[in-house]
Amino acid sequence: MAVFSSAKKVGLLGAGALAGVLVSVGVTAVAQRAGRLPMGEVQQLSDVFNLVKTYYVEPVEDKKLLQDALSGMMQGLDPHSAYLNAESYKEMREGIKGEFAGLGIEVGTEDGFVKVIAPIDDTPASRAGVRAGDLIVRIDDKPTKGLPLNDAVKLMRGPLNSGVTLTISRKGDNVPVVIRLNRAMITMQSIRAKMVEPGIAHIRLTIFNENTIKGLADAMERMNKQTPLKGLILDMRNDPGGILEGAIGVSAAFLPARTLVTSTDGQIREAKRQFYASPEAYTRRGESDPFKNLPAVSKTVPMVVLVNQGSASASEIVAGALQDHKRATLIGTQTFGKGSVQTILPIDENRTEAIKLTTARYFTPSGRSIQAKGIVPDYLVDETPDGDPLAELRTREADLDRHLGADKDNKGAPKAALTQEQIAEKAAAEKAAIERLRNRKPLEPGGAEDHQFLQAMNFLKGKPVQTAKPKSGLAQSTVPAGAAAPTK
């Protein structure tokens, strides 16, 4: 049985999304590679299983017990390894394709309710008149107050053409608005692009899925036809990552052909790989190169990459590659630090269940480890001129329990125990940040109040960049050595 035999047969993940064609690894093949099963421990598992079946207060199905055992096994490894039941596996595949049956609404939460961030154009939600700012208070007969956002999203998705009723609280209306919709096939838009000034483009990349590369190619061609590009801002803030092909393709759009984008290193030989900016690495067999008509200026236009603590995995691969090759200047805050590779391994004959297993670490072209470190920008610029108002609520890979270290010789230092005084101070700081969040207006990326975006514009225009505020005064940065030349 072929295991990890070619680039097209490896399921590599960024932030929980699948890349490549799945490989089925049978139990026999795994046992042969790993050695003989520890029969004493297997017998112990069998004994516990029988005790639970016999003495638990209520009957428990065999399948549930075994699935819970698998989940516990995977969760004990690291934060990103997991057992995927049939439903989770299906949702992951939908996320990779960027298509699912739903309503076409980007949502968040506010005051415990589901809030519409924006309806996606030409979807059931936009055609029915759902508006940005609407609060969804009920989905069919299910109240949303206090409902986890993921659960609300699951309720709004469903079989193609099936119906769902939303009850909406809308500012200015005294009575709730009730809207009946039918689910349709929704295509997730990972690229949003516009000219912010003549010759300067802002490309917002929200996730890496199967639509990303074509979306980027179309946007670059369209904008360059409007006005020849003189400057480019690639905005990957809060981009959780996605498929590896997407990261290689986005990097390839701006780097010379055959340039090293990233490498991986793991326990087995097949996990030690190098990935280059070439069509074979970001297209599937038989597909044409989406970048074949890409304007030549994409390889040379002065470029800024915006990143923050929410930039993870595939977005960190792109940021690290463009920084190492001095192709772009990075502005923002240190990234999340999710630099590990997950491989999807189906575990049943029908390929309806699988495990998501961490198999390698990512490295930048110069050999820097991304794992638990992240990428440090050339210019450290906080979200606001006065700092990050929500810094106490930010989490990085290094804050997660059981996170991997930067390399095989660095297992990740255990967290030091906090004193009671430190615990109280931390709780008070988090409470204050939550209050600030409650009264905070959503930041529009690329808007007039987007401080990091404005500093990127300053850089492209050759103006000083306001870097992170030190304890006294506001630093004024100049262009660092080796950075892309600003556009006058």
Image (spheres, grey):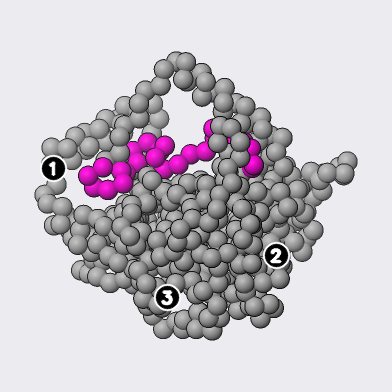
**Which residue bears the numbered disc 2?**
196
Number of numbered discs visible in the structure rendering:
3
Q: Quadrant of residue 277?
A: bottom left
Locate the N terminus and report the quarter of the image it occupies: bottom left
Mark 3 or 1, closer to the camera: 3
Marks 3,1: beta carbons within 8 A: no
Cα–Cα span, label 2 and label 3: 26 Å
Taking the spot 27% from the left edge, 36% from the top edge, the residue there is 49
Name the mark on residue 431: none
Disc 1 crowd, CA 10 A, few/some/many (<14, 14-19, 20+)? few
Cα–Cα span, label 3 and label 1: 51 Å
The one of 347 and 218 positioned closer to us in this rendering: 218
Taking the spot 61% from the left edge, 67% from the top edge, the residue there is 487
SS state under label 3 = loop
In the image, 430: left or right of 412?
Answer: right
The one of 236 and 367 positioned closer to us in this rendering: 367
| Res. 478 in view | yes
The one of 400 and 337 positioned closer to us in this rendering: 337
Locate the C terminus and report the quarter of the image it occupies: bottom right
Disc 3 crowd, CA 10 A, few/some/many (<14, 14-19, 20+)? some
Q: At label 1, which amino acid type do we have?
A: Pro
In the image, 123: left or right of 26?
Answer: right
Q: Give the vertical position of 74 relative to 271 (above or below).
A: above
**Which residue bears the numbered disc 3?**
256
Q: Magenta segment, which residues?
A: 384-410
Residue 330 horizontal/vertical position (percent): 51, 56
Residue 83 horizontal/vertical position (percent): 36, 49
| Res. 357 in view | no
Residue 70 horizontal/vertical position (percent): 32, 44
Q: At label 2, which amino acid type do we have?
A: Val
**Which residue bears the numbered disc 1?**
38
